[in-house]
Image: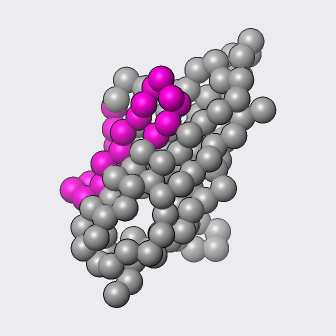
Amino acid sequence: QVQLVESGGGLVQPGGSLRLSCAASGSISSIYTMAWFRQVSENQRERVAIITPGGDTYYLDSVEDRFTISIDNAKNTVYLQMNSLKPEDTAVYYCNAVLSLAASAVKYSVWGQGTQVTVSS
């Protein structure tokens, strides 16, 4: 019904930049938040950044001055611009959306498939 498709991961040297994209498609009625998480251990994901359709944002402390999250409401797409990347930013990054489907007020949390970001010289 709803799919999140991510793109933009890859290998970059320390100090470099990457831009992740995540497009939501399907019978979407409303999007409440879109966010980026990263896998920090086998059982734990940490939220890197989150944005509302109105543009309110929140960042993990360790990325606040380096990453920027943005949203294109017309395209149901969220972006994560990552600058000054560090080796400790290496992880699989996942897109998440909290949304409702057409003709329903129920909220769902939907995840993308993940995209690998590797920061290494």
Q: Residue at x 71, y 16 (%)?
A: 102
In which quadrant will I find the N terminus? top right
Q: Is residue 44 visible?
A: yes
Check the image and report above or below for 40 versus 73: below
Q: Residue at x 28, y 70 (%)?
A: 16
The single residue placed furthest to the right in the displayed view is: 1
The reply to whether the magenta stretch includes residue 59 is: yes
Residue 120, percent from left and from top: 38, 83
Residue 66 falls left or right of residue 104: left
Quarter of image, res 62 = bottom left
Residue 63, percent from left and from top: 30, 60
Check the image and report above or below for 92 versus 64: below
Residue 14, percent from left and from top: 29, 78
Residue 2, percent from left and from top: 71, 34
Q: Residue at x 44, y 75 (%)?
A: 11
Residue 28 versus residue 74: which sits nearer the camera? 74
Quarter of image, res 12 = bottom left
The reply to whether the magenta stretch includes residue 77 is: yes
- Highlighted magenta segment, given as a residue range: 56-78
In which quadrant will I find the C terminus? bottom left
Q: Is residue 62 visible?
A: no
Quarter of image, res 72 = top left
